Amino acid sequence: MVQLSNESNSDEIPVNVVSKNEEENNPSTVESKSSESPIDELTTELELEKQRSSEYEEKLKLVLADFQNLSRKTQTDIENGINSKINEFALDFLQIYDDFVRAKEVFSESKINSDGLDSILKNMDSLLQKYHIKQIDALGEIFDPNFHEAISIVKDLALDDNTIIKELRKGYISHERVIRPTLVEISKRDDD
């Protein structure tokens, strides 16, 4: 007769072979035979294995979710690192860009041909656009400390308080973050 073990710690199902003579001499074998049939034993084993399989499936789902979260976080960290380096470079580049804009203004005021500078500035604008760097339009807007930095306040009864009346230096946004605020002059009503 074949007797199955109820051990659930192993991945294998142990099988003990018992001869007919041993079965008759061993009272525990007789008791197990009378108390539980082989079908019942197999059904119990099947239920235990189903439970273990369900537990493994649950662990696998958790590990997969952890992996997906780690993958997303790693991707975000890489993107943030790249964007940070682009922003760092852009700040240095914007200083040179500002110099070209000032040079163009001086050439225009002096009535000197600035076609070459216009072409360079157009290329620089394309480069800024390619890397998602946009100017902050501030003139006429209400002062917002998230986008603007006030340098001076001018008394003006015709305008609402904190209206931007002059841009002293352009500000820029990169990937939805301000990398350089706009330097502005704002109005103030003194109704004293």
Image (spheres, rainbow, N blue to C red):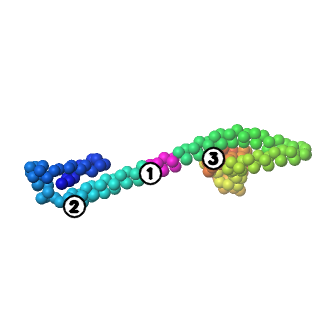
Q: Which mark is residue 39?
A: 2
The answer to whether the residues at label 1 and label 3 have Cβ atoms under 8 Å apart is no
Image spot of residue 130 (x, y percent) = 71, 50
Q: Quadrant of the N terminus?
A: bottom left
The residue singled out by tag 1 in the image is 64
Query: Mark 2 packing: few (<14 Cα in 10 Å), some, or many (20+)?
Result: few
**Which residue corresponds to the image point at 73% horizontal and 45% vertical from the top-left?**
168
SS at circle 1: helix
Image spot of residue 133 (x, y percent) = 68, 48
Q: Nearer the viewer, mark 1 or mark 2?
A: 2
Give 187 or 177, whichever is nearer the viewer: 177
Give 116 or 106, whichever is nearer the viewer: 116
Determine which quarter of the picture holds residue 181: top right
Image spot of residue 188 (x, y percent) = 66, 50
Determine which quarter of the picture holds residue 51: bottom left
The alpha-carbon separation of the residues under discs 1 and 3 comes to 36 Å
